[in-house]
Each structure stands twice: as structure tokens, then as C-alpha cells.
Amino acid sequence: MTTALPFAAAPVTGGLVVPGSKSETNRALLLAALGDGPSRVTGALDSRDSRLMIDALRALGVSVVPDGPALVVTPPPQFTGADRIDCGLAGTVMRFVPPLAALADGASTFVGDPHASERPMGPLLDGLRQLGAAVDGDSLPFRVDPPETLGNRAEIDASGSSQFVSGLLLIAPRLPRGLTLRHTGERLPSLPHIAMTVAMLRARGATVETPDERTWVVAPGGLRALDSTVEPDLTNASVFLAAAAVTGGRVTVPGWPAQSLQPGALFLDVISAMGATVERHAGEVAVVGSTPLHGIDVDLTAASELTPVVAALGALASGRTTIRGVAHIRGHETDRLAALTRELRRAGIDAEETPDGLTILGGTPRAAAFEAYADHRMVHFAALLALVAEGSTIDDMACVGKTMPHFPVDWAGLVS
């Protein structure tokens, strides 16, 4: 259903409490399912992706029960095979749950949304085969049959997604002989997400060694139960802070951690480089806009989820913006590089796709009927352009429910 996007008749000012990190939520839930007892996960994101993770864990025999602001996760004595685990379009579900299913007592099958079969899965599934699992298929839908005993070595090319590495590392402490995992590709995107996985494993008692930048060695020994609190999603926060930057306003996000492993934290460096002012106070961060912004050359290898928001900023900045290091986002919810190029041009902005990113010549976007491609980040992109392009619309606002169901209300309230 086509939805009108808010236009900013004045500088955007205000504050917003951002829900929990999707990346941290789904890691915390899965690690809790692997613990040696019940764990409480407080501040977990309530979204389609997190609900899919909870449903997948329950299908494998895990108890997940709400208790006030927390979810109590209780591992089963033995994971059970499950039929038709729905991954939707959630990368963390389709790449983290199949390794868990390899620990079950029987086969599991996995399905997803219509576009899910286009998301890369081959390296992860090949890694499971190297560990001894029988896997029928190289993309969704597929079936995983656990072996009697899982192996301890795998080599994969994780150039397409760091989640291939994280998915195998998450179960590594439960493998009888641990795991030595090696990345064989030339480049590895989103290293902060792997660092997040490693830090969360270590916090639960796992021994993880990194002899070099492409090898991980995890000792066997299981994982401790651990009560944890999920940080706000800093990537989701970026679109609200960006609204201040492009309109000359001021937006505050409380709960911003002083230090974070989330790649979204890098947004503050990006927006500062483009000319906005970043203010840090105890427990919060604010961005103060200074229009016009100016274009930058930025490598987003470590934080590729920021690409749609940075692309929108580049469209509204003076001069040229070059985004590099994000070739792998062609395999995200949609081919984001192609989609961003198409939608920028739809708004009258000069944009070119490059082998590993985009070049954008800033200007004044015209009103457009934007397409979302079932991609929540493309809605954020369009919402930012619409702040200055009065009369713009989006064809699928509902897809933001993937990570932030309340985005339409929160966005309209902030802009108004």
C-alpha cells in the first residue's frame, strides 16, 4: 500500500528512544539457547526478525517465555529436528539457526520469503557439510541432517557475509572437539559483527583464539548461562540522527553506549565528516545539523548496513559522495546497490554504481514514488529524501517491521 512520507517544513528537533539491536538480540537469544541453564535477555528487540528467531528456537525445543521486560530462555536437554523453520528475510535466522539445527536429534528444513532464495547461503551450508552434516540445497529452501558426530574444521569464503563466520562460531563451543574456522576469501565485510560474536561468546565462558585476521579457533567446553541487556540499535538510530543533519535541526538518542561493538556506532564519524556536529553527554548522543552537508569518500566495509542512510545524505550534500567497500550488499534483502542507484535517479539525483559501491553527486531531490524492494533500509533512505522532497511516497512502509515496527509512528512524530 502506498504511503505518503513526511515532509519537514522546519528543522527536525527532538529525541527518540531507539529499540534494541537486532544483531545483539538474535545473538543473545541463540547463545542463551546454547547455555547450561536459563538466561534472561532484557531489552530484546520486538520485531519480525526477532520473532522469527524466537519461533525457530521454539521449533528446535527451546523455551522462550516473556517475563516483564525480559525474555527467559531455557535450553532443552536435546535440540529436536523441526519442519519448515521460517527464516523470512532475516539473515541472522537463516545463517545462525541451521548450525544450531546441526546439533539436533533429527533433520530440519528451512524456508523463507519469496526473495529469501536470492540471499547467499552457499558458504555457510558448505561449512556445515565440512563438519559432517548432510545439507540438501545451496539456498532457501534447504534441509539439514545432523551427523552422529560433528567435525572440528571448516574453510569457507565469507566475502558475501560475515554472518557465515558468526553462524558457525556460535555453536563452536558445543562441538565435541571445538572448531577451527578459516576464511579463504580476499576480503571480509562487517568485521565488527564478528567481533560482537566473539565478545559475546567469551562473556559466556568460551575460549576463542584468533591466530590471524582470517582464522578463529574455539575450544570445546560449552557455554554458561548469562543474563544480559541488549543495547539500542545504533544502525536504526542513524536515520533519526540523519534527519537533524539534513534539516539543520537537533535530534537526541538516549541510551547510546560509551563504547559499542555495533557497526552502527561508526555513523557518528560519518556524519561528523559530512559537516554535522556530534554532541556526547552522559548516556546520550545528539546530532546538530549544519546545512548544507558536504560529500565525502567513505569506506563502509565495517558498517555496510549504514549504506542506504549515507547514500541519502550524499544525495542531499554538496559535492560528490563515494561509498566504497560494500559490494556484498548486493546480496542483502535486495541488491541494495542497484536499488539505491535506481531510486536516487528516480528522485533526479546523479548516481552511479561502482564495483564495490556508489558515487553520488549531491543536489536537490524531486518528489518521487519510491520503491522499498521489501527492504527496511530502503524505507529509511526514502524517508530521508522525502524530508526535502515534498509529496514523496513509499510503496511498502510495512517492511520496516523487520527491525523497527514502530518506525512510521516514531518518524512522523519526530518530523512533525
Image (tube, helix red, strand yellow):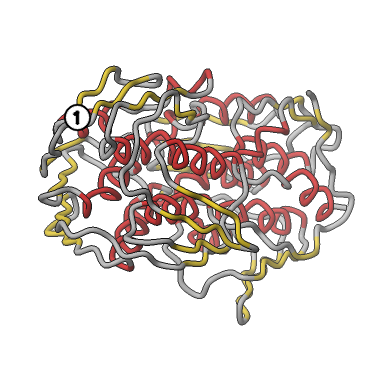
Q: Is residue 171 left or right of residue 52?
A: left
| Residue receiving disc 1 | 133
- Residue 297 can be seen, yes or no: no
Answer few, some or many: residues within 10 Å of disc 1's Cα (few below 14, many 20 plus, some between 14 and 19). Answer: many
Front-lying residue, 192 or 205: 205
- Residue 18 can be seen, yes or no: yes
Q: Identify residue type, mark 1.
A: Ala
Front-lying residue, 172 or 12: 172
Q: Is residue 237 left or right of residue 140?
A: right
For the point 50% across and 54% down, which residue is it? 25
Total marks shown come to 1
> Which of the 4 image quarters holds residue 151?
top left
Front-lying residue, 314 or 255: 255
For the point 49% across and 41% down, which residue is it? 53
Q: x and y percent of residue 11 in the render?
A: 83, 58
Q: x and y percent of residue 1 in the render?
A: 78, 23
